[in-house]
Amino acid sequence: NAVTMQKGYPAMPDVWIPIALVGILVSTCLLVVWLCRALGSLGGSGPEPVIPPRCEGCGYDLTHQPESGRCSECGLALASSLTPGLRRPGCSWEARAGVVSLVWTALGALISPRRFYERLKLRTPQGPSRAFARWQYLIMGGCSAAWIYLMVAEEMSNRGDWTELFIPLLVGFAVPLVGWGLQRLVSAFVASWWVIHRMVPDMGWGRKVFAYETSFLWVFCLYNGAWLTSFFLYNAWLSWWLKETFDVRPHLGAFDPEEAAVFLGDIALILAWFCRYGVIGRAIRWSNF
């Protein structure tokens, strides 16, 4: 309330602050549930479409073509498109699920999306990809709980007052939840674009991609977590640094520098995610295995 009064905003009665925050979380949960159902309904539950073998370089129909020779359209060797496991050997998680393969699969999808999805087998059951996403969510939730514990311990050791911990606790819970909802929202937009423009012949491939793209959600959580930790420990340090270094007190409209950094950074991450999906769409458009 003190911050809103300093900025000229009408103050909210203290009794309504927890109600408003809980309402935001409940609304976010409902939105996430709706997006999950909408995304899961894409592609239907009918049999998989019969897709003729295609050149994985340009999509040329390779029906009745031998494995020797090259594609008459793009010149890609036909063996790379028609030989199982040659161009798409799959990911380590689907070959053998475990802690090591979980880490390597997440790093591969995050660091090199084009190479990862060009090698990913798409015409395989979706159970492993769903399990991969569930494990990522569980680990993120555990990291969020550990962060909350550390912030509580820091606050109690410095002040011994638990009444000021409501906002940090709520934020520590909300960041993974908002990130999860954001992932579903971005996936829903991408899936709609792919369906309208017929980017992939089977949306089951898209659902597998969305599961492995949980890896990029780590970037969102780590970015926001780093900023929130710095705010919690050092308050408005960015404003102080700008004032001490440049002797200015910047304000970006209604936003302080800290708020603007988080907001603009998240916008940049969302745009980067859409760019990733552009690369991924080209990598999975044609797949024979």
Image (cartoon, rainbow, N blue to C red):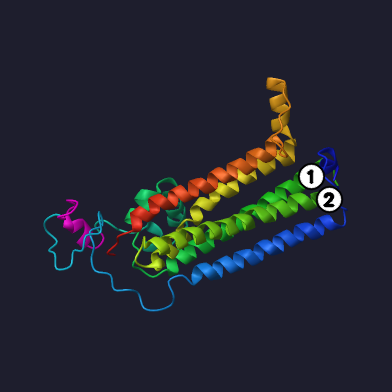
Task: Give the magenta range.
Answer: 71-85
Cα–Cα span, label 2 and label 1: 8 Å
Q: Residue at x 71, y 52 (%)?
A: 171
Dot 2: element: helix
Residue 72 on the magenta span: yes
Mark 2: amino acid = Trp
Mark 1: amino acid = Glu
Count of numbered tags: 2
Closer to the camera in the image, 36 or 227 = 36
Q: Are marks 2 and 1 in contact (CB under 8 Å)?
A: yes
- What secondary structure prevails in the magenta region? loop
Numbered badge on residue 162: 2
Residue 111 position by quadrant: top left
Classed neighbour count for the residue bearing mark 1: other residues with Cα under 10 Å, few (<14), some (14–19), many (≥20)? some
Q: In x, y percent, where is residue 219? A: 54, 47
> Left or right: 29 with respect to 4?
left
Numbered badge on residue 69: none
Which residue matches tag 1? Answer: 155
> Left or right: 140 with respect to 119?
right
Residue 208 on the magenta span: no
Q: In x, y percent, where is residue 46? A: 40, 79
Q: In x, y percent, where is residue 35? A: 56, 66
Closer to the camera in the image, 50 or 238 = 50
Residue 267 position by quadrant: top right
